[in-house]
Structures are given as C-alpha cells and as structure tokens.
Image (cartoon, rainbow, N blue to C red):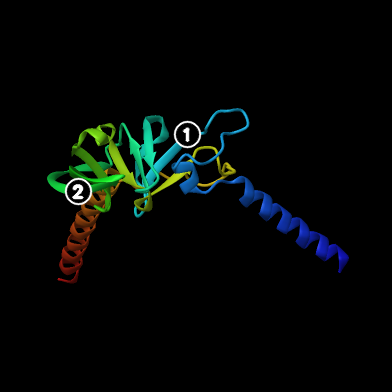
Amino acid sequence: MAARENVLKHRQKMVNITFASTPAVEEKLLGQAEEDEDGDDLPVVFICGKCKMPVGDSMSWDGSEDGQNQIRLKRITDNVVVGEDTRLHEATTGKRSLCLIVDLFCRGCRSVLGMVYSSTPKNLDYKRFTFCFNVADIDSYVLGSASQMVAAEGPIEQPVTLEYRSVVEQQLTEMKMVVMSMAQRLEEIDISLQD
C-alpha cells in the first residue's frame, strides 16, 4: 500500500514538473514566456490549426499583438495564399482606425489564417505589409521540445502533401487502366478457349 502511494506521488510530481516547466503556446507566441536557461530560444514552426501545413517560423518573427491575439511574421511559406480582395477593417489600438486588409488563406484547407495590412494610418505603419496570423487559427511546434525516438524497423514514411497526393492518384489511375485491360484480355482468352 505504501509502495503504491509512493508511485502515485512520484507520477503526480512528474506531471506537475512537466506541465509547470512547459509554457503554454499562447505565452510563447505572445512573448510572455521566460527565456531558456542558456538565453537562446528554440525555433518555433507555425502550422495551420486545421490541416497542420507549415505556414511560417520564428526566424521571420516581427512581433505580436496581445490585445488582438495576433502574431506578425516578415516571411511565410508557399502554403499560405494571399487573397485578392481588399476590404476595410477597423483596428482597435487605443483609438479606432480604418485600414485596408487582404486575407491570408491556407493552401491546404482554404481556411482564413490572418491578414495583411495594405493601407494603415500612421500609428499602425509598423503592421503594413507584414503577415498577421490569428493565434486561434494556427498552432505551433517548438523544435526539439518532444522526446524523439528512432524507429528500428519499418518503412520510411513520406509526408502526404498535395503534390505527393496527386502523384499517387495518377499512379492509381494508371494501375486501374492496366488491370481493366488485363481483365478484358483474360475474358477474351476465356471466350476463345470455350469456343
């Protein structure tokens, strides 16, 4: 009984240490997390919240907006599509200001990830032509944060991308045509043997 209680206390202690030492994604994204012990922050990869395609990384970090729950990046990946339609947006930073924005879409699932300010008042010039992502629409992954294992056996799996998927679909179509041709030929041979 005492041994079981010690095991349970040890597990709870490990859970508390794990969750106490891991800052929340929002804290990390909004710059509220403390720096690592050696002073270097680990790189962060930002991914679409729905389909998990990478949209950017912390190497292109430009800042964050606590009140609007946004992060700003200087560069993005090819997985982000900049919309074509400009629309009015009312920014709230102390006082209300009208801006022209263009939406940012995920190439994989077409969900809206954020916006680009194409025209701003003088007090918001720092946001102009930066990529502003809504924290609620993206996730992040801190490189080196997970314990990693190498699989001893098994095939090397290739990530499923849109290009890879189209290649596989084309190969399946070609294989289907070959199988149908072979089945038709076998049917013809079978009929000729019966005659």
Q: Residue drawn at (68%, 49%), measured in percent from left and top?
A: 17
Which mark is drawn over residue 2?
none
Apparent side of residue 46 relative to residue 167 in the rendered image (left or right): right
Q: With respect to residue 62, does 29 lie above or below?
A: below
Dot 2 amino acid type? His
Q: Which mark is residue 43?
A: 1
In the picture, which quadrant includes the N terminus? bottom right
Residue type highlighted by circle 1: Pro
Viewer-proximal residue, 21 or 4?
21
Q: To which residue does mark 2 refer? A: 89
Nearer to the camera, 168 or 8: 8
- The quarter of the displayed image where residue 195 is located: bottom left
- Which percent across, then down, holds residue 139? 41, 49
Left or right, 128 with respect to 154, comes to left
In front here: 131 or 100?
A: 100
Furthest-bottom residue in view?
194
Residue 19 in the image: state x and y as whole percent: 61, 51
- SS class of the residue under badge 2? strand
Q: Is residue 3 above or below residue 170?
A: below
Q: Nearer the viewer, mark 1 or mark 2?
A: 2
Mark 1 neighbour class, 10 Å CA radius: few under 14, some 14 to 19, many 20 or more: some
Instruction: Tell me how far mark 1 sits from mark 2, CA to CA.
Output: 32 Å
Q: Which secondary structure, mark 1?
A: loop
Q: Residue furthest left?
A: 85
Q: Position of residue 171 (x, y in %)?
A: 25, 49
- Mark 2 surroundings within 10 Å by alpha-carbon count, few (fewer than 14), some (14 through 19), many (20 or more): some
Lower sequence index among marks 1 and 2: 1
Q: Is residue 46 left or right of residue 105?
A: right
Q: Is residue 191 visible?
A: yes
Query: Is residue 85 left or right of 135 when viewed as pictured?
Result: left
Relative image position of residue 177 (x, y in whole percent): 19, 55
Q: Is residue 156 visible?
A: no
